[in-house]
Image (cartoon, rainbow, N blue to C red):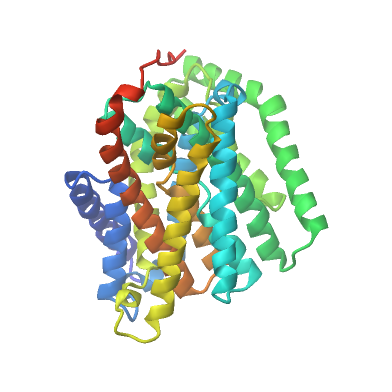
Amino acid sequence: MEPGGIFLTLCALIAAGVVGGWLAVHLDQPAILGELAAGALLGLLFHQGIPFWEDYEEMLELLGQVGLSALLFSVGMEIRMRDIINVGPASAGVALLGVVTPFGLAYGVSMLFGLSPLVGLFVGASLTATSVGITAEVLNELGIIGTKGSKIILNAAVLDDVLGLLILTIISGVAFGERVSAGNILMLSFMIIAFFSLVLIAVRPLASRLMIFMEQSYGDNGTAMTSFAFLMLLSYGAASIGLNVIVGAFIAGLSLSESKVRKHISAAFSPFISVFASLFFVLIGTKMDLTLLNPFEPGNLSILSLSAALLFCAVAGKLASGIAIAGDRENRLFVGAGMIPRGEVGLICGNIGLMCGALPGNIFSSLLLVVLFTTFIGPVFLRVIVPRKLRYYPRIPVDSEE
């Protein structure tokens, strides 16, 4: 292994992510789209293998996983417990319908295409969770982040992210355990509940006090290092009982979401997340086989057909979630459109399926296509719907930070 080669490899991959993200932002699209596309283009250019990183592939995957854990930690810190507890019936109904409908549709389509039940579970799970970050950014750009419909969307997106993580943990546990049984699922569900309860009830207040102590006695650097160690500890704790490490990262962030030093922790993590989460998405993109988009290759027609069917399930399943809003017909389409974009959780789920051998490479590429298109379609729908019906979305006060 050539000394220093890992640094050149990191430079190339991160530079590709920067270029892709920059182009996406200047095309009025989320940066994640550009990062995935940059990785996919690298994979296409070096279809037989990417020579300058073959020796470092395991190390790059590890760095990407650390960056991903930091990203999920950051997402958790943006979700306050009172936001989850105070989710109204409308948001809860939207979240539940928005998880069950695309999951059921995608699983049914997978069976129709002759895929195995385990593959169908991963495919369905990959299409459940809405990307909170992408939707929130679009609503903010449109200037309607404080409206009634927007509050329903964001609360529902938070809840279905939590549900998506729970589904992911159960299915990945089943995949690695190589068997599907009611007892296995019940045991995994019990572990999830026990882990969440232990951290949020017993560990959460202690962690918050520790962060305040470190801030007062050591400063921002001490707070950043301690919170990173806390993130790693809970990620290890999740992995040690058979859960995915990202569950530990998410719950670590959630347990610090109402800490008085939350803003300091977020500021300290921001540059790290920007670099290494971007690296993760570029690496995900390299696993996508763009040659499958060629319709003139006979073997590609079935994958393209599957992608089209799954895209329909992904869009229709989330649009249908707006039905859960009783007595508010005008907001139904708006809320459903806001729930369409997929993002981190869907990509994570698909990647875990690929890593454990449950998902074939062509099915994974099909899922990536669906995630890319939903990430594009959702914001487009919102930009079309909102200007026409803005009068139906009266503003309400935005919650304060404290």
Q: Residue at 42% x, 22% y: name it.
A: 148
Residue at 33% across, 42% down: 274
Taking the image as shown, residue 241 lies to the left or right of residue 249, namely right
Q: Residue 42: in sight, yes or no?
A: yes
Is residue 60 among the parts visible in the rendering?
Answer: no
Residue drawn at point x = 40 percent, y = 16 percent: 398
Q: Is residue 334 depicted above or below 10 in this figure?
A: above
Residue 230 located left or right of residue 284: right
Residue 138 in percent (x, y) is at 31, 36
Give percent across and percent down for residue 93: 58, 35
From the viewer's side, name the closer residue of 346 and 379.
379
Quadrant of res 380: top left
Residue 126 x, y percent position in the rendering:
52, 56
- In this view, the residue in front, 127 or 326, is 326
- Residue at 38 percent across and 80 percent down: it is 300
Residue 379 % position (x, y) = 31, 43
Could you say which is closer to the camera, residue 49 or residue 154?
Answer: 154
